[in-house]
Image: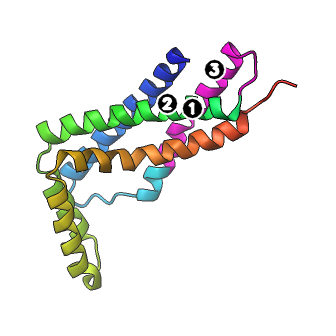
Amino acid sequence: MKKIVLTFGLIIGVILCANMVIMVNMMYDNPDFKGNDILGYVAMVVLFSLIYFGIRSYRNNHLDGFISFGKAFKTGALIALIGATIYVVVWLFYYYLFVPDFIDVYTSYVLDNCSEADLQAKTTEMANFKEMYKNPFFVILITYSEVLPVGLVVALVSSLILKKQKQ
């Protein structure tokens, strides 16, 4: 199980990181860049679908084609956790070493793209977010919260699909 979890977790983590670096650089290089949250989450679901293949590989190659829901979910959750952890670690290095002004750029981006009616509330929200982002623990939590829930949902659905008990 370890080899499958590490292999699929590393693949997911590397692709997540590459996507993150590309998207952040696009935001820096093009001030008119318009992100698409829906597209980003769809891409994450597609990427995390590798969890399905990791669980299936473990079931078919190591468990004679049978796996319980619990073991399947554990496998999928570990794959998601490894991918998310790689993403978090790379973001910490990338943020603190290469884009320490990211919050300022992101705040400007958010405020430029909100309506006049929401401007005051968004300004306050972004000021609070910027203050919280000074704490590395918060940075870790918020970064995990971007990707890990998606991975866990995919692991849950994959486990339900792939569970197969011995008759």
Q: CA distance from mark 3 to mark 2?
A: 13 Å
Looking at the image, is 110 positioned above or below residue 69?
Answer: below
- Amino acid found under the numbered disc labelled 1: Lys
Element class at badge 1: helix
**Image marks 2 and 1: residues in contact by CB distance under 8 Å:** yes
Q: Position of residue 25 (x, y in %)?
A: 23, 44
Q: Nearer the viewer, residue 76 or 25?
A: 76
Q: Which badge, 3 or 2, is on the more N-terminal residue?
A: 3
Question: In which quadrant of the rendered image does the C terminus lie?
Answer: top right
Q: Residue at x 71, y 33 (%)?
A: 162
Q: At label 3, which amino acid type do we have?
A: Tyr
Which residue is at 24% across, 61% downward?
Answer: 32
Give the residues drawn in magenta, as a range. Answer: 42-67
Residue type, numbered disc 2: Leu
Tell me, for residue 74, which label it has, or none: 1
Please tell me how crowded label 1 is: few (under 14), some (14-19), or many (20+) other residues with Cα within 10 Å.
Answer: some
What residue is drawn where x is 32% and y is 60%?
34
Q: Is residue 161 magenta?
A: no
The image's mark for residue 78 is 2
Q: Main secondary structure of the magenta part?
A: helix
Name the residue rendered at 34%, 57% in the picture.
35
Residue marked by disc 3: 58
